[in-house]
Image (tube, helix red, strand yellow):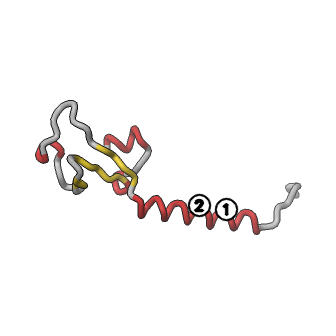
Amino acid sequence: VMLSMVTGLEPREQRLLFKGKEREDTDHLHMVGVRDKDKVLLLEDPALKDMKLRAARAVAAQVTQSPRQPFIQV
């Protein structure tokens, strides 16, 4: 949750890697051996990234297909 405030990625979108292994959501970092100055990689979940990209493309396709009205009638 603390990383989501900095990165903008929701906790379910995050993947943490430490010593080449993906850590589970229930793992506490100090319990898997993370110490001060250790490197932990934070990656965006590729499956969720792909879903976001597809949704954005679908929205963009709908916008380009919808007729635009240049004036607002009151």
- For label 2, the SS is helix
Residue type of the residue flagged with mark 2: Ala
**Closer-to-camera residue (37/30):** 37
Measure the alpha-carbon separation of dots 2 and 1. Answer: 6 Å
The residue under the point 81% across, 66% down is: 67
Please tell me how crowded label 1 is: few (under 14), some (14-19), or many (20+) other residues with Cα within 10 Å.
Answer: few
Residue type of the residue flagged with mark 1: Ala
**Closer-to-camera residue (45/64):** 45
In this rendering, is residue 26 above or below 58?
above
The residue under the point 49% across, 65% down is: 51
Q: Name the residue under label 2.
A: 56
Q: In which quarter of the image is residue 68?
A: bottom right
- For label 1, the SS is helix
> Which quadrant is the N terminus positioned in?
top left
Q: Mark 1 points at which residue?
A: 60
The residue under the point 19% across, 55% down is: 26
